[in-house]
Image (cartoon, helix red, strand yellow):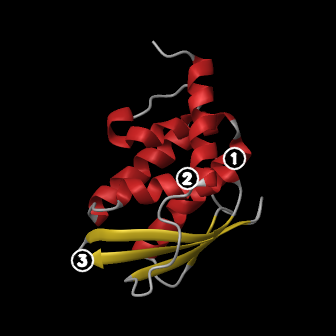
Amino acid sequence: MTGVSDLRDLYQEVILDHNKRPRNFGAIDDASRKAEGHNPLCGDRLTLYIKLDGDRLVDVRFSGSGCAISKASASMMTDAIKGRTVAEVDALFDAFHQMVTSEPGGVIEAARLGKLAVFAGVAEFPTRVKCASLPWHTLRTALHEPGAVATTENETTS
């Protein structure tokens, strides 16, 4: 059985790895969708690029700057959603958002979230919830509100 300190160590290791070596970092020149995201609380800014084939996300990349949690979340999110349909991505968004905004120690849909479950610890730090969820809100904006800017300003953290 994995203890709480083991989970925290894993969380820190994953965040540091994806912050130092983000996956899918860079632009897609012929992106089908693009959205900007901004977290005014800590200054995170990112641009998300999506290439669609029908309703399937065949390529997803991001650029920008931000804190380690925001960058790691964007990196892991792009890995997790590549190749999925819009409906599958929407369901993953809901599961991720529920996990990071619920009470610490809440139920985690580990089977659905996979490696993203490492972000469960973010729920203990309400100001960091916005850092972890900015890429996800930017994703939802790109898919459902093209041209809008995603922000964490009006997001609830509980």
Look at mark 2 in the image and give the residue it sits on.
73
The structure residue drawn at horizontal position 55% and vertical position 40%, both measured from the top left corner, is 119
Relative to 158, is 94 on the left or the right?
left
Label 2 – label 1 distance at C-alpha? 11 Å
Q: Amino acid at mark 3?
A: Asp
Q: Are marks 2 and 1 in contact (CB under 8 Å)?
A: no
**Residue ID for mark 1:** 128
Crowd tier of the residue under label 1, counting other residues whose Cα lies within 10 Å: few below 14, some 14–19, many 20 or above:
some
Please say if 29 is above or below 77.
below
Residue closest to the far top: 1
User: How many other residues sit within 10 Å of disc 2, few (<14), some (14-19) or many (≥20)?
Assistant: many
Give, as a three-letter code, the residue at label 2.
Ser
Q: In x, y percent, where is residue 41?
A: 77, 59
Residue in front for this viewpoint, 30 or 107: 30
Horizontally, is 136 left or right of 90 in the view? right
What element does badge 3 sit on?
Answer: strand
Q: Residue farthest to the left?
A: 54
Name above or below for residue 54 compared with residue 79: below
Q: Quadrant of the N terminus?
A: top left
Rounded to the nearest angstrom, the CA distance separating label 3 from label 1 is 33 Å
Query: Which circle's residue, 3 or 2, is located before the other in the chain?
Result: 3
Rendered location of residue 64, percent (x, y): 64, 71
